[in-house]
Every structure is written in structure tokens, then in C-alpha cells.
Image (cartoon, rainbow, N blue to C red):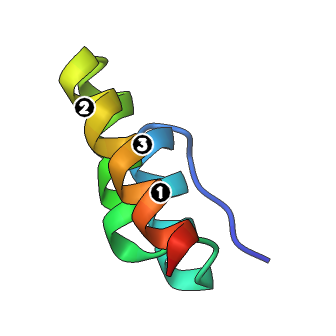
């Protein structure tokens, strides 16, 4: 079982995605950056990373 305090839920979730291999590291990185900043350009980067991974 893994637990966390909830202080940094975005960073924790991104790390879980990386460690478990749920998604590739670039997708997890882009997802984390998107949810930390909320910027439209980060959404584009996340979509591009996800598409690249899906085509993989």
C-alpha cells in the first residue's frame, strides 16, 4: 500500500504514473506540468506527448 499526505497531489500522482508505467515519462511530465500551471500551451504539449506515446 502507498499513502501520501495530500500536500502535493499532482506531483504524487505524476510519480505514481511514472513508477507504475501507467504512461511514459514524457506523458507524466507533460501532465504534471499542465496541472501545475494550467496554461493552454502546456495542454498542447500534453496532447502531443500523449499522441506520440499512443502511436508508439
Looking at the rendered structure, the secondary structure element under dot 1 is: helix
Looking at the rendered structure, the secondary structure element under dot 2 is: helix
Q: Residue furthest front?
A: 55
Q: Residues within 10 Å of mark 2 (few under 14, many from 20)?
A: some
Residue visible at 26% across and 16% down? 40
Q: Locate the N terminus by quadrant.
A: bottom right
How far is the residue under mark 3 from the one under mark 1?
Answer: 6 Å
User: Viewer-proximal residue, 39 or 56?
Assistant: 56
Choose the circle earlier in sequence order: 2 or 1: 2
Does 34 sit above or below residue 47? above
Residue visible at 35% across and 49% down? 48
Residue 51 numbered tag: 1
Residue visible at 41% across and 66% down? 52
Relative image position of residue 16 (x, y in whole percent): 56, 68
Residue 42 numbered tag: 2
Residue position marked by numbered label 3 in the rendering: 47
Relative image position of residue 29 (x, y in whole percent): 31, 58
Amino acid at each position: 500500500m502507498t499513502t501520501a499526505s495530500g500536500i502535493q497531489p499532482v506531483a504524487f500522482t505524476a510519480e505514481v504514473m511514472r513508477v507504475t508505467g501507467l504512461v511514459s515519462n514524457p506523458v507524466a511530465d507533460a501532465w504534471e506540468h499542465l496541472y501545475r500551471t494550467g496554461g493552454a500551451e502546456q495542454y498542447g504539449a500534453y496532447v502531443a506527448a500523449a499522441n506520440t506515446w499512443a502511436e508508439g
